[in-house]
Image (cartoon, rainbow, N blue to C red):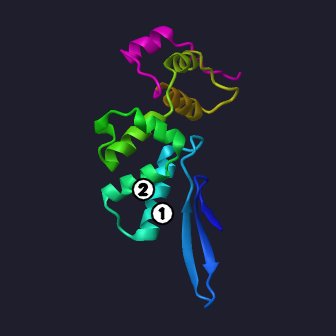
């Protein structure tokens, strides 16, 4: 059994009586501990490997048949236009399972950021850039100047 990623697409080789190897794929139901994008990619790879090119209607049917009961309950709460096509359904699932950013926490981390002892300026710059990218700052430059406590340590 060969597994791709942790999402559950496995390739199992079975030897037939004639000695010819054939392949059978198995797709696990969606598990919320893995990113939905990975599971959708596995679904699409599974369909391609099993059936070749598949139209959107068949992809949607395969998704609904294999996604699992927890995600099916989520889908039941979608608006009709969110589930009317495969692409809309995948977008709605990605939006639903997308990690939410707590802006209050992110702002606190940003405005109380300090550099580590002898930390290169480039590393601090990356840290500031990554943290600030998670926030929706209005008038960001003014707000940063006004509120930031970010300090760069200087060694003597």
* Disc 1: CA contacts within 10 A as few (<14), some (14-19) or many (>=20): some
Q: Nearer the viewer, residue 145 or 154?
A: 145
Query: x, y percentage for residue 91?
Result: 37, 42
Q: Quadrant of the C terminus?
A: top right
Residue receiving disc 1: 46
Residue 143 location, x and y as percent?
43, 12
Total of numbered circles in the picture?
2
Q: Residue at x 45, y 23 (%)?
A: 135
Q: Residue at x 56, y 40 (%)?
A: 32
Residue denoted by label 2: 62
In the rendered image, the quadrant that contains the N terminus is: bottom right
Local SS, label 1: helix
Verify CB contact (< 8 Å) between mark 1 and mark 2: yes
Q: Which residues are magenta?
A: 133-156
Q: Quadrant of residue 89?
A: top left
46 sits to left or right of 140: right
Q: Residues within 10 Å of mark 2 (few under 14, many from 20)?
A: some
Residue 39 vertical position relative to residue 3 in the rendered view, above or below:
above
Q: State left or right for residue 119 relative to residue 90.
A: right
Rendered view: 45 above or below 121: below
Q: Is residue 114 above or below residue 145?
A: below
Q: Main secondary structure of the magenta part?
A: loop
Q: Is residue 135 above or below residue 59?
A: above
Residue at figure coordinates x 62%, y 62% from the top left: 3
Tell me, yes or no, whether the highlighted magenta stretch contains residue 136: yes
Q: Position of residue 124 (x, y in %)?
A: 58, 29
Queried whether the magenta region covers residue 10, the answer comes back as no
10 horizontally vs 83: left or right: right
């Amino acid at each position: 059994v060969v597994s791709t990623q942790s999402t559950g697409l496995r390739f199992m080789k079975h030897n037939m009586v004639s000695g010819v190897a054939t392949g059978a794929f198995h797709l696990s139901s969606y598990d919320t501990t893995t990113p939905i994008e990975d599971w959708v990619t596995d679904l699409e790879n599974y369909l391609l490997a099993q059936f070749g090119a598949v139209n959107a209607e068949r992809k949607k049917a395969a998704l609904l048949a294999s996604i699992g009961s927890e995600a099916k309950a989520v889908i039941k709460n979608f608006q009709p236009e969110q589930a009317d096509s495969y692409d809309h359904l995948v977008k709605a699932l990605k939006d639903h399972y997308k990690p939410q950013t707590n802006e209050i926490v992110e702002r606190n981390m940003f405005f109380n950021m300090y550099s580590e002892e002898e930390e290169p300026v480039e590393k601090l710059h990356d840290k500031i850039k990554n943290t600030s990218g998670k926030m929706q700052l209005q008038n960001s430059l003014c707000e940063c100047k006004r509120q930031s406590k970010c300090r760069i340590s200087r060694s003597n």
